[in-house]
Amino acid sequence: MTTRETTRGNGHPYTGDTPSIGTFDSPQLAPPAGHYSHVATHRGVAYISGQLPVTPDGSHLAGELFEVQARQVLSNLDACLAAAGTTRDKLMSVTVYVTDIGDWPTFDQVYKDWLGASRPARAVAGAKELHYGSAVEVQAVAALD
């Protein structure tokens, strides 16, 4: 974990009632390609940056089938949740961007299988294009407690 701001002694972001904001990256993912962090935390909430279908070694999966891309995005989301010290069942809100709304049923099934019984708030938005030619991107908000 690369920590840019405040962390508590165990390496996880500080989540107390102070105004500190923790920002860090998942050690299981390729480093961010731009000026952002994988995760920012504040007052018991983790804000997870949009995750694209990029493998841990930095390979882009834009040429792969939509389902392969969707599974990689959710795997990346898992890595961010783990780095923040939280899990899927603590997701509060998920936003999904797809370049072809016709892929939505496929994503919904992969997401349902991945998430299980949890049902966080969710939005889907059609996007003309996503970075690196990706077909799907997911960002999320999760509780840390």
Image (tube, helix red, strand yellow):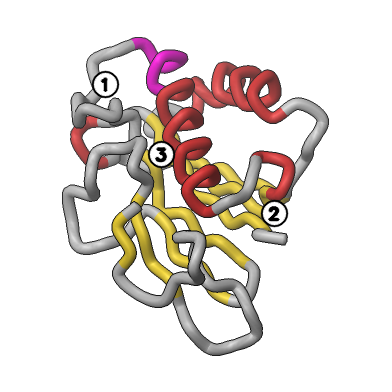
Looking at the rendered structure, the kind of residue marked 1 is Leu
User: How far, Cα to Cα, is label 1 from label 2?
Assistant: 27 Å
Instruction: Name the side, left or right, on which 79 lies relative to 110.
Output: left
Q: Earlier in the sequence, mark 2 or mark 3?
A: 2
Q: Position of residue 110 (x, y in %)?
A: 60, 19
Magenta run includes residue 67: yes
Residues shaded magenta = 65-69
Instruction: Determine which of the numbered discs, if any, sits on residue 137 in the image.
Output: 3
Tell me what residue is drawn at x 65 percent, y 59 percent.
Answer: 144
Q: Are dots 1 and 3 in contact, CB under 8 Å?
A: no
Q: Which of the two residues, 98 or 22, is positioned nearer the viewer here?
A: 22
Density class for disc 1 (Cα within 10 Å; few <14, some 14-19, many ≥20) is many
Tell me what residue is drawn at x 55 percent, y 48 percent.
Answer: 95
Whether 65 is drawn above or below 143: the answer is above
Q: Earlier in the sequence, mark 1 or mark 3?
A: 1
Q: Earlier in the sequence, mark 1 or mark 2?
A: 1
Q: Which residue is mark 2?
A: 92
Q: Which residue is mark 1?
A: 61
Which element carries disc 3, helix, strand or loop?
strand
User: How far, Cα to Cα, is label 2 from label 3?
Assistant: 17 Å
Which element carries disc 1, helix, strand or loop?
loop
